[in-house]
Amino acid sequence: MLSKQPLNKTIGTFIPPVRTLMGPGPSDVSPTVLNALARPTLGHLDPLFIDLMDETKALLQYAFQTENKLTMPISAPGSAGMEACIVNLVEPGDKVIVCQNGVFGGRMKENVERCGGIAVMVMAKWGEPNSLAAIENALLENKDAKFVGFVHAETSTGVRNDAQAICKLAKSHGCMTIVDAVTSLGGIELKVDEWQIDAIYSGSQKCLSCVPGLSPVSFSDEAVAKIQNRQSKVQSWFLDMNLIVGYWGQGNSGGKRAYHHTAPVNSLYALHESLRLLHEEGLENAIARHAEKHQKLKNGLAELGLTLLVEENSRLPQLNTVVIPEGVDDASVRGQLLNDYNLEIGAGLGELAGKVWRIGLMGYGASDKNVDFCLSALKQVLK
Amino acid sequence: MLSKQPLNKTIGTFIPPVRTLMGPGPSDVSPTVLNALARPTLGHLDPLFIDLMDETKALLQYAFQTENKLTMPISAPGSAGMEACIVNLVEPGDKVIVCQNGVFGGRMKENVERCGGIAVMVMAKWGEPNSLAAIENALLENKDAKFVGFVHAETSTGVRNDAQAICKLAKSHGCMTIVDAVTSLGGIELKVDEWQIDAIYSGSQKCLSCVPGLSPVSFSDEAVAKIQNRQSKVQSWFLDMNLIVGYWGQGNSGGKRAYHHTAPVNSLYALHESLRLLHEEGLENAIARHAEKHQKLKNGLAELGLTLLVEENSRLPQLNTVVIPEGVDDASVRGQLLNDYNLEIGAGLGELAGKVWRIGLMGYGASDKNVDFCLSALKQVLK
């Protein structure tokens, strides 16, 4: 006998409408990627699946512009990628200079503190990049700092931090660098090796235009050495890179694979396909496309009398924070766009809630079609 | 200029063969579920997606046979579900009696220790259930123990532990119960409320026949109170139920949802569909089907002269550990089944490696067709 009876109502299969996703992510997923997602499931130790894993690592190395052997997707969303980088590297008592200019720097602080690290905060105004001078000050005042962590592309504000300059500064003070590239990977220039990034994480659902749920990460040899020589075990079993590497393997091919956790097989088909499409287009072309569509959107917004929050030199092309004009009702506009146009744009987050909209032009969604559609819908709703 | 040139070779889209998955999971996924998986992605805060989340919670409550408000899938595989239960409940210094009779009890120990808990191990032979007398002894010797953790269905050995009796014993000693139901949910009887289970985790890719990557969890009110009244923060930000509940909501419907992490939207379509199919069939019918197909497989194996490792009264119908006969080459048989028949069966794990095969009959794969196919293929390969 069942102690709990079946639900009274019949639950039907879920048929979502076709939305145009121009928020902060998930972004529009290419039909090709959705097609790959639904292919027959293989076992997570099937030799053919291991080939796919090896190709995925090579494609990620290309996307990240790195030769790092320890480059792979974490089997969970970007927030878990952040946690993977921090819990593996930061040991209790380790000091981390954390740059914050939006939501995600604050999340980095949380992660550092939850694994016993000491977070030294360098704050900047929401909508502005972190200042190099302030970071240098923090480095001078904290000579025992071991890491500098920052967000390359702040999804909550649309700001680009100067990753190359921050990393150069950090390395000149003997610090390793931990970089949030959730929204930057595939959308703007990002060179892990050349810029000396030691640990980096991203998300599948932004400029890679894959479905949400995976977080590509990469670790430099210096970072790997730190992880291998920890005094204490990594506090997360699921995210322990020393164990995960037994399944994903060292380098790009061959070697026996040991079971760690059951990989999200189908989501990895989709990630492979989205990286393959990026490789086929070419990273430089994809980056140029993001810049071009951003330009077009910006011009169109200006014609509607709308302005961007972020100054031009630190503006992200893939995430446009639009100042909500005086007297315009935030929720009502987003609701109309969603219900009448099947168009999702993002709300403001944290202290920018109610003050901005976030319009994403990411990956497959960074297209003339999406820009035209969004501008035309906004024009009608705002008039 | 790119610092790393594109890969030399062209990488084609990945077209997997259609395997029959009769290992320890992932199990065969219904085409209906794969179809749901590939539907257009919605934003993770889209009102229609939130409706899907609410339905998913109600369907999970039915599958778990619970009224627990805090019932939802974790956005990562079963191993993360295990970690979610343990890091949320176990505080530094808390003593946990951990029953181990295979791989996954050992993983529970790892997780307890990595969050500062003290694991008191109750061991049983691989292939046998944990003894109630040994657990009672441990409870008597450790009056300060706060939890008893055990694996309901040991995927590494094919053994069912008597969850109802272990929970009754634990509760009579004032302990909360943490149960691994990765392989049991949907395949054998499991009654969270009636059996007084306080925290439980499962996996999407076993008897639910969904794609891998999600871990349904459920917490009793007593467990929720412990989590809310912790002295220290949960060490994992990503798995902190106090934060996740802000996104998934309390109860089954309504209420504002706050962003925590980006949910794996498409995988959740698939989970919803697989739970819907379970609900449509009826839990009792699904459980009866698993038992029936197991009986059929067992009879067929006996005709081939093959025996099962586990004694009948603690044998799992959904995970059959078959003793590899003397003189038969383990890897060669599995290789032939995979390459000549596109049929995956599982290898032995841990101390059973090379000694057993693991034949799964899970969810959609617990069918006459699969049993017949597997027996016929084994017969040909073994002759």
Image (cartoon, coloured by chain):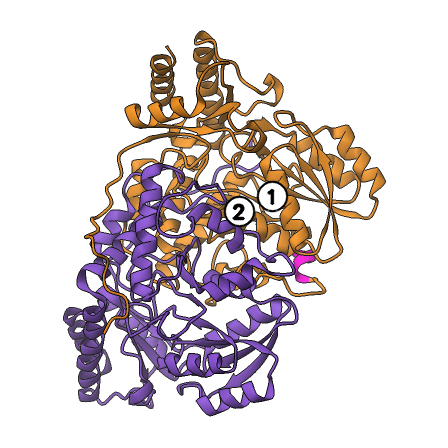
Chain colours: A orange, B purple
Residue A30 point in image, percent of width and height: 33, 35
Do circles 2 and 1 both sit on a common chain?
Answer: yes
Q: Nearer the viewer, residue A278 or A347?
A: A347
Q: Is residue B243 magenta?
A: no
Instruction: Decide if residue A101 is in sight here.
Output: yes
* Magenta: main secondary structure: helix
The quadrant the C terminus of chain B occupies is bottom left
Residue A192 visible within the image: no
- Residue A4: x and y in percent read 27, 66
Q: Is residue A134 left or right of residue B248?
A: right
x, y percent for residue A77: 47, 47
Label 1: which residue? A107
Question: Which element is circle 2 on?
Answer: helix
**Circle 2 sits on which residue?**
A79
Identity of the amino acid at label 1?
Arg
Provide residue B364's location: percent of width, then percent of height.
22, 64
Whether residue A225 is in magenta: the answer is: yes
**Disc 2 and disc 1: Cα gap in Å?**
9 Å
Q: Which residues are magenta?
A: A224-228
